[in-house]
Amino acid sequence: MNKKINTMYFSATGTTKKIVCGIASKLLDNTNETLTVNTIDFTLPSARDKSVAFTEDDVIIVGVPVYAGRVPNVLLKYLNSAKGNGALAVAVVVYGNRNYDDALIELRDILELNDFKIIGAAAFIGEHSFSKILAKDRPDEKDINILKDFANKIYTKIITEDKFESVDVNGNNPYKKYYMPENKEGIPVDIRKVTPKTNSNCINCKLCVSICPMGSIDNNDVSKLNGICIKCGACIKKCPTNAKYYDDKDYLRHKEELEIDYAYRKEPELFL
Ligand SMILES: Cc1cc2nc3c(=O)[nH]c(=O)nc-3n(C[C@H](O)[C@H](O)[C@H](O)COP(=O)(O)O)c2cc1C
Ligand code: SF4
Ligand code: SF4
């Protein structure tokens, strides 16, 4: 295969990264060449300051997590600044076992509008950012085997076809509104203002400061936020002493409801 393999992903708690890098690595295995994968991780704000451009010689596995049934809105500006210039792309969304709603079709459309040629798309499942039990430890071995098979099919498509039409995916355009949780009376609740708290377990290691995708955690006082919180789960799940937590009643109710309603296993969906 005469293409340079690239990954491009946002991954606050690491599940999207696992899927995207897994697909790229299996694609690379197929090539029998001593190439390496070029990685563009745009999780941190500094990475989103630089826009990227590709050529017809590139293939890019592009992945984002599903937030509120859509592509995370904080990423739209960056994604729209990427220039495909005819590069081949695989669109991947990773969701927490509730639903990916219109996120995959939205990502596909964004990439096509920016002159990428879509050769495949997929929705995988990752442990939910809000929870330690919903889709726990996914992607797991079964997901990885599906991912490898998907990468093999992408490889075959690249070497056997020379004209790429768009790929049909699940979802609708116009896209659904951003999904909102409901309280027990069925009234939608806005959890956008909810932020994590910090307890006395904190050892002031500053890890949370360096991993917050919004760059919002204050370096001098890690219990303070200087910007928005997207509830990505990074500071909660990665804190070595479990010092970060939520106490908002609506948020916690929503998390527990998701854990009950979506306790059954969903499987990845692939589009070629
Ligand atoms: C703000 C927010 C909204 C989310 N919305 C959804 C959703 O609508 N459907 C779903 O199944 N998972 C949802 N998730 C869960 C993530 O899509 C899922 O856990 C994903 O694996 C996280 O990717 P990452 O590990 O790369 O950060 C949401 C997570 C966050 C932080
Ligand atoms: S990662 Fe945890 S322990 Fe380290 S500074 Fe942040 S809250 Fe404190
Ligand atoms: S403060 Fe909010 S946005 Fe920043 S890492 Fe924590 S959950 Fe994510």
Image (cartoon, rainbow, N blue to C red):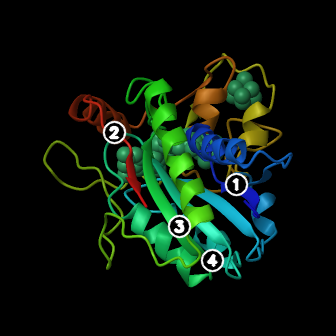
Q: CA distance from mark 2 to mark 4?
A: 29 Å
Which amino acid type corresponds to the residue marked 1 in the rendered image? Thr
Q: How many residues crowd around disc 1 within 10 Å: few (fewer than 14), some, or many (20 or more)?
A: many
Under mark 4, the amino acid is Asn
Q: Which residue is pictured at 42% across the width and 62% down the height?
A: 103
Q: Determine the CA span between mark 3 and mark 2.
A: 21 Å
Of labels 1 and 4, the one closer to you: 1
> Residue 80: which numbered mark, if any?
4
User: Which of the labelled discs sits on residue 175, or is there none?
Assistant: none
Query: For the residue marked with disc 2, what is the amino acid?
Result: Glu
- In which image quadrant can residue 53 be found? bottom right
Q: Nearer the viewer, residue 196 or 168?
A: 168
Front residue of 66/59: it is 59
Closer to us: 203 or 67: 67
- Dot label at residue 267: 2
Going from N to C along the chain, the mark reached first, 2 or 1, is 1
Label placed on residue 7: 1
Q: Of the numbered discs in the image, which one, if any, rests on residue 119?
A: 3
Label 1 vs label 3, nearer the camera: 3
List the single residue furthest toward the right.
34
Task: Decide: is 220 above or below 159.
Answer: above
Question: In the rendered structure, which disc, 3 or 4, sits on the residue that comes first in sequence?
Answer: 4
Where's residue 101, x and y in %?
32, 59
Give the CA distance from mark 2 to mark 1: 23 Å
What's under tag 3, amino acid-wise? Ile
Quadrant of image for the N terminus: bottom right
Alpha carbon distance from label 1 to label 4:
16 Å
- Quadrant assignment, res 257: top left
